[in-house]
């Protein structure tokens, strides 16, 4: 038995360290350390409630709008506001632009470059894939960045800039869309759709969304344009490297639901573990037993939560808390969202092999197609001239919760107001769920479970596979601890 | 030129913003300028031990370090130990790494307000002990000290902004790769003057509302954001309304106040961000270079002369009155 410490992981957002215990080539235990603590929950104490809209997005530069939407949602809940339809549509467009851009960033900049490494030079797909996906230098990165920047022009229009907009408000958005701008939104989306259909899928978005099983996916991608497109490159190497057998975690998937229109979620909320259970935010609690934080005697619901550093605590190995749903480890992210929403391809992949490196990536690629189609509908539904924002007075004493789906999963903000100021503010981010340390019962978090039992004698190959598993979650470490 | 980029107590948003650069080929642009990316946490292939080796080689002087870019604040806590960010896989606080690298760097660049001045991470009680590379808020010093000069003889170049505009960083890097920057091309806070000599007010699309002091009263109103909504665009140094963000945006175009994110200490304005602090009904923060008496007199005059169209539109989220169409040719 030996112990190795791996880090720094790059091409994750933020910093990450993983400790492994290895016995004869098999990983028998993993401990995940989120090594950066900034203390946003303490920074927010005593602030004017609406100042959360300035601080919270700055938790994260890659999920900034998600943080804004969660903060605005918590404030809205505290004030008791209803967002007008245009406000919902514009917020959905902002959030989906970020989520889709993040999925693209993950696939092209963070995940795929690992397969272009020299370590895979002996694989049959490497000769074609290397020049395409070489980190920052490959043709894919050069093709993708202008498409991403073009998509994010939706942020310029609706949010002023990205990241760190202040346009998302408790009552809607600060920026009304004018008739010409509605057409411009549509033009930006059309450009982006064209790029996806040419480079990523080799087919219409509708064809991707219609895939309803792994068999259908394989048939669709067995030749022609999809096989030659970037999704085809991934599916080929995923089979060769057996990525469907790597990185399985708890196979319990949580989604808060997302993209409401007239109050009804576009992607529904729930917890999937073979059947769909309703999600109640009261079932969320955070355990600090293995974090460098003062640990209460039991896991606390975020409205009661505490975040106070205790850097010398025995047994602690991360700044990350351990959030649990009804005391259990869950996984969140695009795959979870699509499984909970009931997309047949996502359900089929999970029934077949659970959450794994391959199914998580497919979940993201499926979601890009679904989300862009939804964005086109939202852009069409905007009614220039009708209101985008409502107003309401802040209460002196209140509490609120804002739940949203960021690209990488379930994000919640819980806030308590006393005497008109923020008396408590707790954030549970997607990677807090996925990369949590052990809880008081000793149960490892989702990534810690996903790394266990990986068998690979060759050290270099093992390090590569560990990185595929880590990156399959699309971790955002700055969000994780915040 | 070798460029090494590290991240610490920030959000990574400056890198994310940089990737929105208005370029058809960002890697080609940097490469064409002769900039060789030794390592960047979001972009580079090498990871784990290979990445540490690259960085160690720079601290040992084995690899020339032409440009050191640091994104995110320097976390000195708890108790000066730097343990709030121990660089993954190294067991060594990031502040130690940055100190060791800055000694060798020909140019040291703070990317974003966090790295420049401490920024948002220094807000509230500053739980992590966040400071900038060469400033702690508006006080010279920071991690490297007021006297620090990089090998090229320059203080830390502070590309402040939360986040940075991609153009600010790109033009800084391209300048360094070209003729370099001279001390007089930086302002008193070390910011490149090519963007920091402008005010956010310059080119603001709410200009007509400003002229007549026709003010927004609530989020989504079209009027000027200075009088009630907390806007500091007439004081904040940046060219945000001269060069658009993400195609055609800016904070004020997005419908909300400039919170002066390029300025040291912006994270603690001493008032709610979205409210303008006033004394006797007059905003405390007057436009830069404008005497108070003149401002008060002009504001009173322009308010009394506000056209009905401007007044009506200032408190609506879309133009409810269009400018009159004249029947004769414009003179």
Image (cartoon, rainbow, N blue to C red):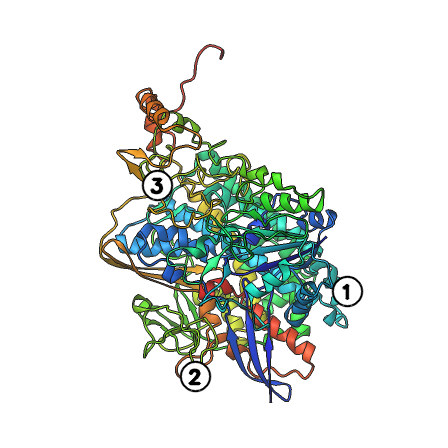
Q: Which mark is residue A442?
A: 2
Question: Are the residues under marks 3 and 2 on the same chain?
Answer: no
Residue at the image point whose x is 52% and y is 35% from the top: B198
Residue at the image point whose x is 58% and y is 57% from the top: A105
Horizontal placement of A370 versus B33: left or right?
left
Q: Residues within 10 Å of mark 1 (few under 14, many from 20)?
A: few
Separation of marks 1 and 3 at Cα, in angstroms: 54 Å
**Residue A172 in sight from this viewpoint:** yes
Q: Are marks 1 and 3 in contact (CB under 8 Å)?
A: no
Q: Residues within 10 Å of mark 2 (few under 14, many from 20)?
A: few
Task: Report x, y in % for residue B236.
Answer: 46, 39
Q: Secondary structure at mark 2?
A: loop
Separation of marks 1 and 2 at Cα, in angstroms: 44 Å
Between circles 1 and 3, the one closer to the viewer is 3
In the rendered image, the vertical position of residue B193 relative to residue A272, given as above or below: above
Task: Report x, y in % for residue B323.
Answer: 41, 21
Task: Report x, y in % for residue A324.
Answer: 39, 74
Mark 1 or 2, nearer chain start: 1
In the rendered image, the vertical position of residue B297 relative to residue A153, given as above or below: above
State the residue position of label 1. A127
Give the chain letter at badge 1: A
State the residue position of label 3. B219
Give the chain letter at badge 3: B
Q: Secondary structure at mark 3?
A: loop
In the rendered image, the vertical position of residue A299 relative to residue B210, given as above or below: below
């Amino acid at each position: 038995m030996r112990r190795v410490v791996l880090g720094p992981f790059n091409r994750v957002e933020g910093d990450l360290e993983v400790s492994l215990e290895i016995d004869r080539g098999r990983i028998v235990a993993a401990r995940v350390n989120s090594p950066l603590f900034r203390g946003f929950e303490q920074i927010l104490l005593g602030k004017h409630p609406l100042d959360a809209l300035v601080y919270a997005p700055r938790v994260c530069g890659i999920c900034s709008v998600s943080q804004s939407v969660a903060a605005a949602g918590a404030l809205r809940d505290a004030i008791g506001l209803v967002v007008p339809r245009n406000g919902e549509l514009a917020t959905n467009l902002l959030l989906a632009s970020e989520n889709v851009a993040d999925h693209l960033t993950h696939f092209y900049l963070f995940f795929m470059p690992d397969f272009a490494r020299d370590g895979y030079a002996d694989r049959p797909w490497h000769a074609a894939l290397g020049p395409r996906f070489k980190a920052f230098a490959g043709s894919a990165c050069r093709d993708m960045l202008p498409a991403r920047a073009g998509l994010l022009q939706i942020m310029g229009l609706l949010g002023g800039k990205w990241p760190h907009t202040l346009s998302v408000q408790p009552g809607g958005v600060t920026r009304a869309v004018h008739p010409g701008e509605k057409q411009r939104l549509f033009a930006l989306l059309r450009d982006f759709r064209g790029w996806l259909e040419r480079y990523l899928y080799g087919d219409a978005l509708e064809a991707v969304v219609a895939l309803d099983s792994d068999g259908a996916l394989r048939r669709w991608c067995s030749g022609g344009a999809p096989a030659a497109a970037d999704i085809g490159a991934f599916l080929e190497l995923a089979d060769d490297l057996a990525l469907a057998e790597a990185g399985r975690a708890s196979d319990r998937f949580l989604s808060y639901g997302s993209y409401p229109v007239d109050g009804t979620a576009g992607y529904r909320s729930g917890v999937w573990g073979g059947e769909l259970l309703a999600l109640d935010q009261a079932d969320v609690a955070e355990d600090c037993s293995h974090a460098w934080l003062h640990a209460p005697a039991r896991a606390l619901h975020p409205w009661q939560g505490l975040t106070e550093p205790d850097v010398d605590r025995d047994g602690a190995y991360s700044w990350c808390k351990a959030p649990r749903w009804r005391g259990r480890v869950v996984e969140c992210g695009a795959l979870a969202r699509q499984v909970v929403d009931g997309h047949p391809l996502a359900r089929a992949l999970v029934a077949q092999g659970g959450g794994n490196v391959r199914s998580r990536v497919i979940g993201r690629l499926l979601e890009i197609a679904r989300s862009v189609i939804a964005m086109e509908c939202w852009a069409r539904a905007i009614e220039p001239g009708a209101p985008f924002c409502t107003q309401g007075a802040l209460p002196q004493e209140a509490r609120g919760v804002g739940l949203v789906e960021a690209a990488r999963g379930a994000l919640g903000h819980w806030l308590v107001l006393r005497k008109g100021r923020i008396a408590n503010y707790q954030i549970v981010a997607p990677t807090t769920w996925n990369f949590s340390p052990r809880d008081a019962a000793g149960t490892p978090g989702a990534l810690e479970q996903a790394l266990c039992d990986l068998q690979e004698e060759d050290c270099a190959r093992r390090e590569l596979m560990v990185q595929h598993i880590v990156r399959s979650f699309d971790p955002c470490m700055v969000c994780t601890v915040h | 030129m070798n460029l090494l980029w590290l991240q610490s107590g920030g959000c990574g948003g400056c890198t994310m913003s940089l990737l929105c650069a208005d370029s058809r080929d960002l890697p080609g642009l940097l490469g064409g300028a002769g900039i060789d990316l030794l390592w960047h946490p979001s972009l580079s292939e090498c990871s784990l031990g290979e990445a540490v080796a690259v960085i160690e080689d720079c601290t040992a002087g084995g690899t020339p370090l032409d440009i050191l870019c640091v994104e995110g604040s320097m976390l000195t806590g708890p108790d000066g130990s730097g343990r709030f960010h121990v660089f993954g896989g190294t067991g060594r606080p990031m502040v130690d790494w940055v100190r060791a690298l800055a000694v060798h760097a020909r140019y040291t660049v703070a990317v974003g307000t966090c790295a420049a001045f401490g920024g948002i991470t220094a807000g509230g009680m500053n739980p992590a002990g966040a400071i900038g590379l060469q400033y702690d808020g508006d006080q010279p010093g920071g991690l490297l000290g007021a006297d620090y000069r990089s090998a090229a003889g320059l203080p830390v170049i502070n590309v402040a902004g939360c986040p940075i505009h991609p153009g600010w960083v790109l033009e800084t890097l391209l300048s360094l790769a070209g003729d370099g920057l001279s001390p007089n091309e930086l302002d008193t806070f070390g910011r490149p003057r090519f963007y920091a000599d402008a005010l956010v007010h310059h080119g603001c699309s709410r200009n007509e509302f400003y002229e007549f002091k026709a003010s927004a009263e609530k989020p989504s109103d079209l009027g000027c954001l200075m009088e009630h909504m907390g806007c500091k665009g007439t004081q904040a140094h940046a060219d945000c309304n001269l060069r658009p963000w993400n195609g055609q945006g800016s904070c004020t175009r997005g419908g909300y106040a400039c919170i002066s994110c390029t300025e040291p200490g912006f994270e603690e304005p001493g008032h709610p961000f979205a409210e303008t602090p006033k004394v006797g009904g007059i905003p405390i923060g007057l436009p830069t270079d404008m005497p108070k008496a003149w401002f008060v007199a002009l504001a009173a005059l322009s308010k009394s002369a506000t056209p009905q169209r401007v007044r009506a539109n200032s408190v609506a989220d879309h133009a409810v009155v269009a400018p009159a169409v004249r029947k004769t040719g414009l003179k």
